[in-house]
Amino acid sequence: MTFLIRPPALAPAALNLSPASSDAALDSDGDADLLGRVKRTKPSSKTIITPGETVTEDSQWMRGHGTTGNPSSTAIIATVAGTLIRTNKLLSIRPLRARYTPEIGDLVVGRIVAVETKRWKVDLSAPLLAHLPLSAINLPGGILRKRTSTDELAIRTFFSEGDLLVAEVQSIYQDGAASLHTRSLRYGKLRNGVFLRVSGTGGGGGVVRSRRQVWTIHTANGGGDVDVVLGVNGYIWICKHTSGGLAATAEEANRANDITKMDEGVSESMYSNRNDHIAAQTRKEIARISGCITALVDGGVWVDEEMVMAAYHASQDVALEDMEDVSDEKQKAEAFLGGERGKKIVVAALEATKR
């Protein structure tokens, strides 16, 4: 039998570069420019990859998340719509809409969905439910001891199904599930507020990671102080400010972190299911802040402290401008912040932050 050995065929050109610009198309590592996409180390909102689009046909690149390969060629094809990210020789696509991916140190807001032996399961809008071990919470009275069978029997007195909590991601299991803890006095069960959920992880309209996520807003119209918690998983909590609560001052935080005085801060009330009295003015300002965040998400703007504060101040001016012909002060305070008024708020907030 005769075998015919053919020379290997040359791969099709992956780059459409002219000879004059071939040297300029290589970065400092000698890598190809990939039509100007892979040189960006951060995702760009200006370059959107669509599903089925060929990212490159150069064999030097490896496929990452959001990409697939063609068995008959070396082409890398996108499977999701998003922005291109390069990590050394690895190409991946960050989707415009995706579930939250936990990372160690993230501050998240979650909801208890199941109570099991020695742990709770928490919904974080992630592919897998997170775990909150019984050993990772503060006991009432600030007692530092090993958890016993008595604590296991009383596990529902701490958290039960449907409860909201703010926690920190302590570790990640091999399957990608997160392990949480609420050992700090600034974490725990959430009360006296409203829950808000936003979406968007790549293209905008989501919560910015690595920014201050808990702060206090000194509201107008006699609303008092309001705490805002931006969970990086897209869950947001807006509530009435309480002494030693989520956004405690430096003096309160130092006092709470003192182990000798921890029993003064950790009491039975921290796991209470009853809300405190909230004045009508405070409720209106909480609703105003919630409307501002919703307007930012609808406008495809990243949500962080700077944008929320700018939108809140802009909402007061926009509401007064649109309600000049209304003499009733109550109607002015209850102005709807959606629709065209919401667009005005987003534009004003972007101009105030120079974005």
Image (tube, helix red, strand yellow):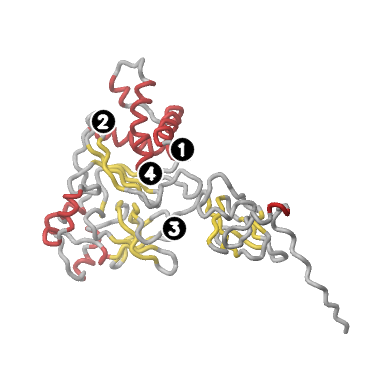
Q: Earlier in the sequence, mark 3 or mark 2?
A: 3
Bin the neighbour count of mark 2 within 10 Å (Cα to Cα): few under 14, some 14-19, many 20 and up: some
Residue that numbered label 2 is attached to = 220
Answer with the quarter of the image where residue 124 lies. bottom left
Q: Nearer the viewer, residue 134 or 232?
A: 232
Q: Residue at x 32, y 52 (%)?
A: 162
As measured in the structure, the alpha-carbon distance from the residue carrying label 4 to the one carrying label 2 is 20 Å
Asked if marks 3 and 4 touch (Cβ < 8 Å), the reply is no
Asked if marks 3 and 1 touch (Cβ < 8 Å), the reply is no
Q: Residue at x 72, y 65 (%)?
A: 72
Residue 185 picture location, percent across and down: 21, 55
Residue that numbered label 4 is attached to = 304
Left or right of residue 271, residue 304 in this image: right
Answer with the quarter of the image where residue 69 lies. bottom right
Residue that numbered label 1 is attached to = 298
The C terminus: image quadrant: top left
Q: Residue at x 43, y 32 (%)?
A: 351
Residue that numbered label 3 is attached to = 101
Amino acid type of the residue that numbered disc 2 sits on in the rendered structure: Ala
SS at mark 3 in the image: loop
SS at mark 1 in the image: helix
Residue 2 picture location, percent across and down: 88, 82
Amino acid type of the residue that numbered disc 3 sits on in the rendered structure: Thr
Q: Earlier in the sequence, mark 1 or mark 4?
A: 1
Asked if marks 1 and 2 touch (Cβ < 8 Å), the reply is no
Amino acid type of the residue that numbered disc 4 sits on in the rendered structure: Asp
Amino acid type of the residue that numbered disc 1 sits on in the rendered structure: Asp
Asked if marks 3 and 2 touch (Cβ < 8 Å), the reply is no
